[in-house]
Image: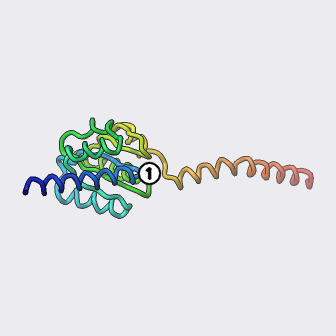
């Protein structure tokens, strides 16, 4: 009887993890070995403020969940102690926060992740984290679109001033 309850509990845990993988727009796998309790608490606080769910999970359960969610390529990153950050709202928030924290604390290492259903290795997740935010990209686009209009307006103003003189 006890074994049946344990197996059922593990199956339920795998189903929950599978659901998180499917619903998450960004999932980042990290090695947290070497972080003390205060550092992990600080990291969890930063992630929670951004709407990111950060959990330490057993690799065997995560491997079963990745198989169910058709993300078996992520299994390469599931070695050693593993913490996983799931985010449903922002596709880069977990990567950005974990990457910034890893720069300050060398003990935290990114292992890989899943963004919009595609599996990426650690270097690709770091590259994603280095990209400007959505608002930053929109402001860059806006400035590029405004430049020709601004230059035209300045040219018209210069011509008008020249004709007045």
Q: Looking at the picture, how far across and down is residue 11, in whole percent?
A: 22, 52
Out of 128 and 61, give the one closest to the viewer: 61
Q: Looking at the picture, how far across and down is residue 119, in whole percent?
A: 38, 39
Instruction: Give the residue at x 28% y 46%.
Output: 65
Which quadrant of the figure contains the N terminus?
A: bottom left
Figure check: 149 above or below 120: below
Instruction: Give the residue at x 19% y 53%.
Output: 10
* Crowd tier of the residue under label 1, counting other residues whose Cα lies within 10 Å: few below 14, some 14–19, many 20 or above: many
Q: Is residue 136 left or right of residue 155?
A: left
Q: Looking at the picture, how far across and down is residue 96, in whole percent?
A: 39, 50
Mark 1 element type:
loop
- Residue positioned most to the front: 1
Residue position for label 1: 91
Out of 139 and 18, give the one closest to the viewer: 18
The number of discs equals 1
Q: Is residue 141 left or right of residue 149?
A: left
Q: Is residue 144 left or right of residue 154?
A: left
Out of 128 and 21, give the one closest to the viewer: 21
Figure check: 5 above or below 148: below
Q: Is residue 120 left or right of residue 4?
A: right
Figure check: 123 above or below 11: above
Q: Looking at the picture, how far across and down is residue 37, in whole percent?
A: 17, 58
């Amino acid at each position: 009887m006890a074994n049946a309850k344990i197996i059922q509990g593990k199956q339920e845990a795998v189903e929950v993890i599978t659901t998180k993988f499917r619903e998450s727009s960004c999932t980042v796998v990290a090695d947290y070995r070497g972080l003390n309790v205060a550092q992990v608490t600080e990291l969890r606080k930063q992630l929670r403020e951004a709407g990111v769910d950060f959990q330490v999970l057993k690799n065997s359960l995560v491997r079963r969940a990745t198989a169910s969610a058709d993300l078996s390529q992520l299994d390469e990153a599931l070695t050693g102690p593993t913490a996983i950050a799931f985010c449903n709202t922002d596709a880069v928030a977990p990567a950005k926060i974990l990457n910034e924290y890893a720069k300050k604390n060398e003990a935290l290492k990114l292992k890989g992740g899943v963004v919009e259903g595609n599996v990426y290795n650690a270097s690709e997740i770091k590259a994603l984290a280095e990209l400007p935010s959505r608002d930053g990209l929109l402001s860059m686009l806006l400035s590029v679109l405004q430049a020709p209009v601004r230059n035209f307006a300045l040219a018209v103003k210069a011509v008008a001033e020249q004709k007045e003189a």
